[in-house]
Image (cartoon, grey):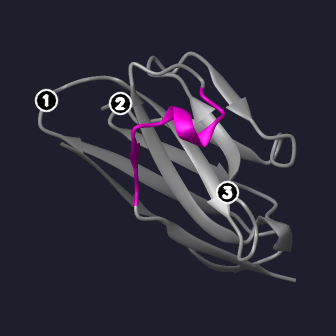
Amino acid sequence: QVQLVESGGGLVQAGDSLRLSCTVLRRTFSDYGMGWFRQAPGKEREFVAAISWSGGSTSYADSVKGRFTVSRGNAKNTVYLQMNSLKPEDTGAYYCASKALGGVLREWNEYDYWGQGTQVTVSS
């Protein structure tokens, strides 16, 4: 069983920064490719960023490139999404997802496990 626990969302103003965290809790050790997705009310879930299981490769949506950074913690079971220069259009529920030994995966249906989501609201 794999459980993903997210934290770090909140209400901020445009231009502010936030850091989201996602910790993978699992019964057996494995390395996971991780992804971040977001969903705004009335819109489809969209890809934000992904990092490979080794941490050596990353990918970003064009809308966040240069502003967001995805990284892994030293223990490798935690992944972070550093969000800088936030914009109102970044508002939404942010979800992390995992795939055992996954590479850089940009499609939501490539992932096996999902977190409960954390809300990010950016006011103008």
Residue 28 numbered tag = 1
What is the crowding at mark 3: few (fewer than 14 residues within 10 Å), some, or many (at least 20)?
A: some
**Whole-number angstrom distance, CA of label 3 to CA of label 1:** 29 Å
Kindly identify which residue carries mark 3: 45
Q: Is residue 87 visible?
A: no
- Name the residue at 32% across, 36% down: 77
- Name the residue at 53% across, 32% down: 110
Q: Position of residue 37 (x, y in %)?
A: 62, 51
Q: Is the C terminus in the top left, top right, bottom left or bottom right quadrant?
A: bottom right
Q: Is 100 within the magenta?
A: no
Residue range of the region highlighted in magenta in the rendering: 105-115
- Name the residue at 69% across, 79% down: 12
What type is the residue that disc 2 sits on? Lys
**Whole-number angstrom distance, CA of label 3 to CA of label 2:** 25 Å
Depth check, mark 3 against mark 2: the one in front is 3
Q: Is the N terminus in the top left, top right, bottom left or bottom right quadrant?
A: top left
Kindly identify which residue carries mark 2: 76
| Badge 3 or badge 2: first in the primary sequence | 3
